[in-house]
Image (tube, rainbow, N blue to C red):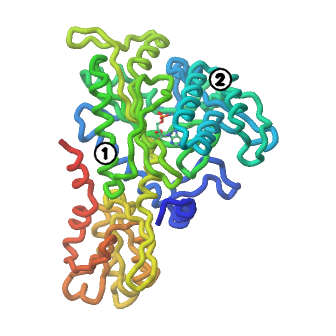
Amino acid sequence: MKKTSNFFDFLVSHAKICGFIFPSSEIYGGLKAVYDYGPYGVELKNNIKNFWWKSMTQLHDNILGIDSSILMHSDVWKASGHIDEFNELLIDNKDSKKRYRPDVLIKKHIEKNLSKNTKKKEEILSRLYKSLKKKDLLDIRTLIDELNIFDPIYKTKNWTKIRFFNMMFKIKHTKDLFLRPETSQGIFSNFKNIRKSNRMKIPFGIAQIGKSFRNEIIARKFIFRLREFEQMEMQFFIAPEEEMKWYEYWKKLRFKWHLILNVENKKDYRLCNHTHLAHYASAGTDIEYHFPFGFQEIEGIHSRRDFDLKNHELFSKKKLRVFESEKNYTPYVIETSLGLDRLFLAIFSSSLKEEKLENGKIRVLLKLPYYLSPIKAAIFPLVRKDGLPEVAKNIFNDIKIYHKLIYDHKESIGRLYRRQDSIGTPLCFTVDYETTKTYTVTMRDRDTMQQKRIHINEISKMIEKETGFEKILKKLSY
Ligand code: GAP
């Protein structure tokens, strides 16, 4: 199926019907840009997290994991620059009462109207970036007038002034507290603790998976841009003179990681250097994925230099410098920052297929990498009589401690297969009349739909071989 808006609607509906993703608080009409992960969604998400975690902390002996708190001392956000700099621009149309990001309005306008006039396009973008850097809101407003940009819905130009909007969620407490907008500040503020407690020497990294919160002005596209989302971040602390070496290293390794993960869809990934950098970064590249709505950022690789550690030193008055190799310095940081929900969406959209079968029927298939599938194997009885359900249930009970399995006998065998295909289960084992005589079951492979008989003692080993992390981690290990 092509990556069209129809496909996207189909994807959103499949995610809901099959128990992967539900709108948050749906019975109350929902909450914009917040979603809940259902029974299969949470399993898939946990497997993705597990794969990233192993890739970072298990394959690199100099990367350690932590789990820091969401709420932090409010000075953290002064030091990190988020209170002053973590802003988006905002403009309202007085007629439609809709709210927009003026930089996005301008970019969309030139993409639509000046796609062939590269010189003019670059001129406008360079003026926009200069004004963004200088915080010249008046000039950005003038640009909107000059380009004759109107409200996409009401087609009027009745715009308000442009203003800044801080994207952090403030919560009510005796002091100002914020929900963290990135996980990395928990890493910077623990730099000293981790270095000391684990006797780490530069270069080394700290990895973390956790929730972040941003008050996004325009939050659309399902789980692509959320107000509550999860990040998988790694901060790699290095000597300043090695900045470019490690920046290039992590760019290459992270790109390779995505290509290995989604090997059949390599062409859907590209690297894109930043033209407009975040307030903390001195160099940045995005890994972009071809989502059903176009190429968009999935992971950012940034050089944050000593921006964070130096500022935390200033605000906390604690020494965060190191004395190593006879030098006293503040380490530089290369960061890899991946959005878990975006990665989920990328994997889900590249896996969801409609396949025409030989009998002309369509099967909906979630062709996930086997090691990420929410359910590793399903065990069925061929019929619901003659003791076959009991045999199948015994097999299920014997191996459920090793793998995430499903036992099902609620429908006919054909329907049971279709259901497992639609949630991406790699293997189905069926107990039939021969099982009681030869102790064998049929094993059906999701992708080929081929069936073969195997001994019941082999089932668990087969599931591990076909769906375990070993094969994929070997490809990343060196
Ligand atoms: N610590 C650096 C940092 O947070 P970022 O580029 O702002 O950098 C990193 O975010 C990643 O987090 C993005 O590449 C994206 O995958 C994810 N992300 C950011 N904002 C998001 C949002 N509102 N919803 C879902 N994912 C988001």
Q: Would you say the residues marked 1 and 2 are in contact, meaning their CB atoms lie under 8 Å apart?
A: no
Disc 1 versus disc 2: distance between alpha carbons? 44 Å
Label 1 amino acid?
Trp
Residue 57 figure quarter: top left
Which SS class for mark 1?
A: helix
216 to the left or right of 354: right
- Confirm or reject: label 2 Cβ below 8 Å from ligand 1: no
- Residue 197 on image: x %, y %: 29, 23
Residue 192 figure quarter: top left
146 to the left or right of 14: right
Which SS class for mark 2?
A: loop
Q: Is residue 470 visible?
A: yes
Q: How many marks?
A: 2
Q: Is residue 28 above or below residue 219?
A: below
**Residue occupying image coordinates x 33% and y 58%:** 264
Q: Is residue 161 above or below residue 382?
A: above
Q: Residues within 10 Å of mark 1 (few under 14, many from 20)?
A: some
- Residue 362 on image: x %, y %: 45, 77
Residue mark closest to the camera, 1 vs 2? 1
Label 2 amino acid?
Thr
Q: Is residue 394 visible?
A: no
Q: Earlier in the sequence, mark 1 or mark 2?
A: 2
> For this rendering, which residue is in front, 303 or 214?
303
Identify the residue under disc 2: 174
Q: Residue furthest right?
A: 95
**Residue occupying image coordinates x 40% and y 41%:** 287
For the C terminus, give its image quadrant. Answer: top left
**Residue occupying image coordinates x 71% and y 33%:** 91
The label number, if any, that marks residue 257 in the structure image: 1
